[in-house]
Image (cartoon, rainbow, N blue to C red):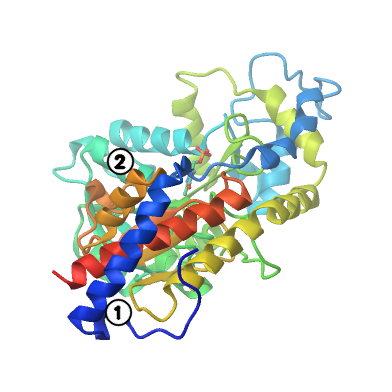
């Protein structure tokens, strides 16, 4: 640690000489950091080994491969997943069981499949396949999840950004864009503890998204509820019931919800879910059935037995919280200790999810990431929370503190703070 939490004058308010002295001190700290020979990785939101261990009872389940309704999970069939697990997650996601498909291990795969189906076949409420449209554009709240953006880019789908606020996307901007441009076919929303901002879509914003008039009749909301149950505090966010809201507003086919147990049980061997209108579910499974005879029902049954009840999922998430909440606290502690009062950075204090979003001085995020890399601290590349990897202000950095040990998180964040200070002082000195 190089500097403690003293009352500080904002860096930009200091004289050039004072900033130069400050830079010299931070460079000394940075050289010490490099000499420490760290090898730390805060790039991706992965569960820590201790979190994966929580689910190891899965490895000896199921006790019996036949479900309560008599399905032999070892055999082919059951494209929409086993009934009992669909019921369990319908309860957790506040939807009806027939609106839920339990699939394979990845919700991102399901999102890609839905986009492929829209592209090749068109939506249930659309006039033609999206591939036959002159232009297709998505609204992208930023900062957002990099894999959403790379997937859209891969399709050649245009991206128009709107700011992400604490209560969700800038809904005025979204409503205006969707109303006036028929090429705008959708929006990707992470409604609960968004990646990376930690934002929670409010009931009002959800209502507006579900009910707003759109120029495209087949406008879709990809409601990616990857962190629906991933609370970090007692203050447990409850996601808006977007399917009912859209249905009540006369747009039942607009939202398609996704979720998974990737960060509940095993990131590589969980179960993913899609929930939508029953017409959308039929549409999805009819396309799915062209290339699949059924999902891994044995893994679904294993999950069902492991959780027991919907409350079993919530209890299990409490055990995750015990492991990861201290890591989020460590991020905040290190950043506060080193940066508070200097006005060179702001960061989120999420109440759930997997990320902290750090905004540094405009034009310095790439430099911070480069300095950190040279000191052995791997951060997600600057710009990755924006379409095409381009942050127009070069200021946002996504921090993922779940995977490293608590000690490593503290060490890494103290190092990141040094990099933020070096880059800020360099920038202010021109
Ligand atoms: N959506 C979001 C917002 C995510 O952050 C992630 C994981 N980083 C995923 C989806 C991936 O989900 P899955 O493991 O179910 O494919």
Counting from the top left corner in percent of width and height, residue 226 is at 54, 49
Counting from the top left corner in percent of width and height, residue 133 is at 18, 42
Circle on res. 365 = none
Gap in angstroms between the C-alphas marked 1 and 2: 36 Å
Look at mark 2 in the image and give the residue it sits on: 150
Q: Is residue 142 above or below residue 90?
A: below
Instruction: Name the image quarter holding residue 179.
Output: bottom left
In terms of depth relative to the viewer, which is nearer, 416 or 119?
Answer: 416
Which residue is at the far top? 75
Counting from the top left corner in percent of width and height, residue 285 is at 51, 30
Q: Earlier in the sequence, mark 1 or mark 2?
A: 1
Is there any visible trace of residue 419 in the rendered image? no
Pointer 2 residue Cβ closer than 8 Å to ligand 1: no
Counting from the top left corner in percent of width and height, residue 424 is at 27, 68
For the image, the number of numbered tags is 2
Is there any visible trace of residue 393 in the rendered image? yes
For marks 1 and 2, give the one nearer the viewer.
1
Circle 1 Cα neighbour tier, 10 Å, few/some/many (<14 / 14–19 / ≥20):
some
In terms of depth relative to the viewer, which is nearer, 49 or 185?
Answer: 49
Q: Is 47 positioned to the left or the right of 179 in the image?
A: right
Q: Is residue 51 above or below residue 31?
A: above
Look at mark 1 in the image and give the residue it sits on: 11
In terms of depth relative to the viewer, which is nearer, 228 or 241?
Answer: 228
Element carrying mark 1: helix
Q: Residue at x 79, y 36 (%)?
A: 306
């Amino acid at each position: 640690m190089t500097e403690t939490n003293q009352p500080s004058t904002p860096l930009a308010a200091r004289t050039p000489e004072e900033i130069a002295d400050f830079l010299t001190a931070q460079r000394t700290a940075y050289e010490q950091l490099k000499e420490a020979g760290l090898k730390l990785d805060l790039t991706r939101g992965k569960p820590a080994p201790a979190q994966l261990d929580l689910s190891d009872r899965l490895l000896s389940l199921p006790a019996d491969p036949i479900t309560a309704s008599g399905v032999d999970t070892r055999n082919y069939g059951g494209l929409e997943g086993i009934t009992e697990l669909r019921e369990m997650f319908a309860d957790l996601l506040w939807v009806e069981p027939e609106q839920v498909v339990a699939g394979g291990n990845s919700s991102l795969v399901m999102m890609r499949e839905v986009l492929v189906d829209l592209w090749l076949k068109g939506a249930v409420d659309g006039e033609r396949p999206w591939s036959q449209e002159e232009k297709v554009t998505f609204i992208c709240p930023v900062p957002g999840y990099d894999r959403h953006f790379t997937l859209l880019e891969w399709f050649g789908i245009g991206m128009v950004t709107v700011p992400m606020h604490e209560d969700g996307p800038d809904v005025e901007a979204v409503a205006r864009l969707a109303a006036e441009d028929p090429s705008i076919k959708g929006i990707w929303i992470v409604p609960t503890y968004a990646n990376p901002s930690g934002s929670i879509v409010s009931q009002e914003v959800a209502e507006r998204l579900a009910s707003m008039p759109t120029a495209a009749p087949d406008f879709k909301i990809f409601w990616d509820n990857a962190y629906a149950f991933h609370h970090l505090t007692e203050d447990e966010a409850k996601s808006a019931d977007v399917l009912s809201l859209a249905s009540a507003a006369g747009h039942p086919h607009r939202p398609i919800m996704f979720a998974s147990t990737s960060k509940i049980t095993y990131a590589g061997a969980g179960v993913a879910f899609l929930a939508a209108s029953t017409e959308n579910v039929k549409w999805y499974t009819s396309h799915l059935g062209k290339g699949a005879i059924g999902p891994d029902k044995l893994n679904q049954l294993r999950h069902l037995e492991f959780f027991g009840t919907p409350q079993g999922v919530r209890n299990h998430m409490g055990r995750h919280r015990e492991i990861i909440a201290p890591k989020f606290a460590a991020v905040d502690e290190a950043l506060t200790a080193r940066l508070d009062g200097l006005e060179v950075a702001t960061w989120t204090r999420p109440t759930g999810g997997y990320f902290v979003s750090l905004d540094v001085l405009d034009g310095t995020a790439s430099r911070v990431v480069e300095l950190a890399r040279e000191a052995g601290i791997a951060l997600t590349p600057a710009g990755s929370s924006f379409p095409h990897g381009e942050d127009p202000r070069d200021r946002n950095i996504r921090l993922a503190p779940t995977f490293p040990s608590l000690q490593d998180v503290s060490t890494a964040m103290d190092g990141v703070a040094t990099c933020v200070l070096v880059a800020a002082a360099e920038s202010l000195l021109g």
